Structure formats: C-alpha cells, structure tokens
Amino acid sequence: MNGLVSIIVPVYKTEKYLRKCIDSILKQDYQNIEIIIIDDGSPDNSGRICDEYEKKDNRIKVIHQKNTGLSGTRNLGIDVSKGDYMMFIDSDDYIDESMVSYLMERLTETDADIAMCDYYDVIDEKLFKNNYPVNEFIVNDNSKYDYLFNQYAVVTVIACNKLYRRYVFDNVRYPVGKTHEDEYVIAEILNNAKNVCYSLKPLYYYVRERTESIMNSFSVKKFDFEFAYNHRKEFFETLGLFQYADLTEYTSVLLMIKRIKEYINLNSEPDRNIVRSKLNYVDTEINKLLKSKYLNLKRRIKLWVYSIIPGLYRHEIDRWMKKKQ
C-alpha cells in the first residue's frame, strides 16, 4: 500500500483557487506521490504560482505548454507520469487530506482497478452532499456499465473522484479539442477494469460559483456531448452490448432536448439551423429507439408519448422558432 501515486493537475486561469488546490494535495497523509501540474497556457498568474510551488516541494513537477484544453493536458499528464496509480484533480477544486490514502486502502482491500469516493458541491463556500441508496459496493463484469445509466451515473463518469491503476488507461486517451471528455472515455476505462469499488465517502470538493452573468453564456461546445455519446454507443456496439448502446442513445436524446432549450434561452443570438438540425436528430432517434427491445417499459412509454405529442418537449422551442420566421 505504498505505491507511487501520480496526481495530475491541469491548470488554466485558476489563480483564484490554485493555492488552495495545491495545498490540499501537499497535505495528503499518503506521502508517496508525484504532483504533475500542467500550465495550459494560462494568461493569468497561474503559471507563476505553479513555479513557486515547484521550488518548495521536490514532489512537484511543473510543465508549461501552449493551450490545448483539458483533454490534451490530461493526456500529457498520463504520458509523463511515473506512478502505478493515477488521479486527476481540477485546479479550481480541492481534496480532503485523507483522499489518497482512503482510496488506496479501498483499492487494495477490494482488489479493484478503480476506487472512487463522492464529492461535495461547494457553492458560495457552502457544502452540498449527494445521497445514495448504498454507499459502498463492488461491481464487475458487464454490470459495471449499469452505473452509467442509474442514480450513480454522475459519480461514475467524472474523472476527479477516482484512484486508477495505471493500466486502465492503456490505449485510452481523452479527445483533444472536445468537451464532455469524461463521457467520451468512461466506457473504455470501465472495460479495462475488472473490479470497480464504489466507496462514496465525500472527499473531493467541487467548487462552483453562483453567477448573475449566466445569460448569453451558452457555448455551442455544450453540444459536444453528442460526439461523446456517439463514441460510447459505437464502443458498446463493437462489444456486442447493444442494450447499453441503446441506453446511451436514449440518454443522449433526453440530454439533447435539455441542451436545445438551454441554447435558445441562454444565447442572445441562437442559430436557427443548429436548432433545426438538433430537433431533427431528436425526432429521428426517438423513432429508432421506439423499436428497441432493450429499453424498459418506463423509458419506452416516455419516448412513445414524445413521439405522438412532440409539443411536450417542443412547445417552447417551436414558439421561439416561429418568432424568428
């Protein structure tokens, strides 16, 4: 239980939070760590802060690079890291001082390839905790994939609440230039893991800020989830796991409906062609999924209702489209 853990910290424009993040890693009661901090071309003082910490502790290695985005930065961290175990920490978040030791203990005792904890949402310095029916269990075989589609989906998908054995990233890298990178790779990572340990004690602190400037802030990159879900669907199809491919498509359709509404509500100049193409995608996929033999009755009924009464999800969108005609 003393293997080297590589902690990869991508940094971009987080000078406000960075010291707290790095300090929380340095305070870990598990000492055998290397901290790889990658300054992804930050235009603020983040890079300078990284260099300052590198001089203080020989476990820290700082790399400066031109901006490639979160995926490219994580990939570089994987490639240069030396540990048999890996973690990712976002530079605007922070962790409990026992997170590494706790996850290492769970990984070792359960013979798992991935061990995960839960997280707190930190909003205006207040902590908000998730609630789960069961807080500790092991999953393996194809049942691993069930947790991408139930109440554990978020904690399953996110990258930063986990300790990984290095080999689960063999032949797996994050998609450069895309968002929803965690959604893109998670099925492949689970496929490389024999056992996955859920031990959902909240030890990661996910910092969010309330803001009044959310209007006009929707980026079309939020539609990148479609790229990620298509990749996951194709991956399941190559494994012959068609039930999970259809569940992925079902999830994608519901998320697309949500994203279209956000796009027209939070963007001052939505593109009608984008909205139309995304609606066509929704309609086409609903019709295809209605023929699926893998969706349960509740999901099939929901899609059936949408197919015969599209106004249930299109009313707000259609009203906006008519205004633009």
Image (cartoon, helix red, strand yellow):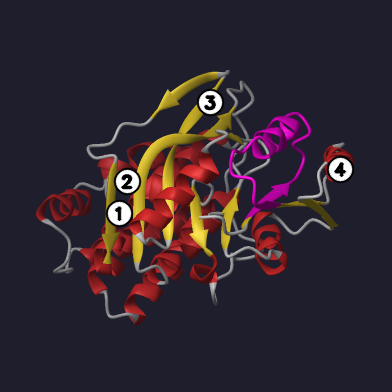
Q: What amino acid is labelled 2 in the image?
A: Tyr
Q: In this rendering, does residue 289 appear at all?
A: yes
Disc 1 marks which residue? 147
Q: In the image, is residue 100 above or below residue 281?
A: above
Distance of label 3 from label 1 (alpha carbons): 24 Å
Under circle 4, the secondary element is loop
Q: Is residue 14 magenta?
A: yes
Disc 4 marks which residue? 43
Q: What amino acid is labelled 4 in the image?
A: Pro
> Which mark is first along the chain, 3 or 2?
3
Distance of label 1 from label 4 (alpha carbons): 38 Å
Q: Where on the picture, by quarter, is residue 148?
A: bottom left
In the image, is 140 to the left or to the right of 187? left
Q: Nearer the viewer, residue 105 or 321?
A: 105
Distance of label 2 from label 1 (alpha carbons): 6 Å
Q: In this rendering, does residue 158 appear at all?
A: no
Q: Is residue 44 magenta?
A: no
Cβ–Cβ under 8 Å for marks 4 and 2: no
Q: What residue is shown at x 33% (from left), y 50% (from top)?
A: 254
> Which mark is first along the chain, 4 or 1?
4
Distance of label 2 from label 3 (alpha carbons): 19 Å
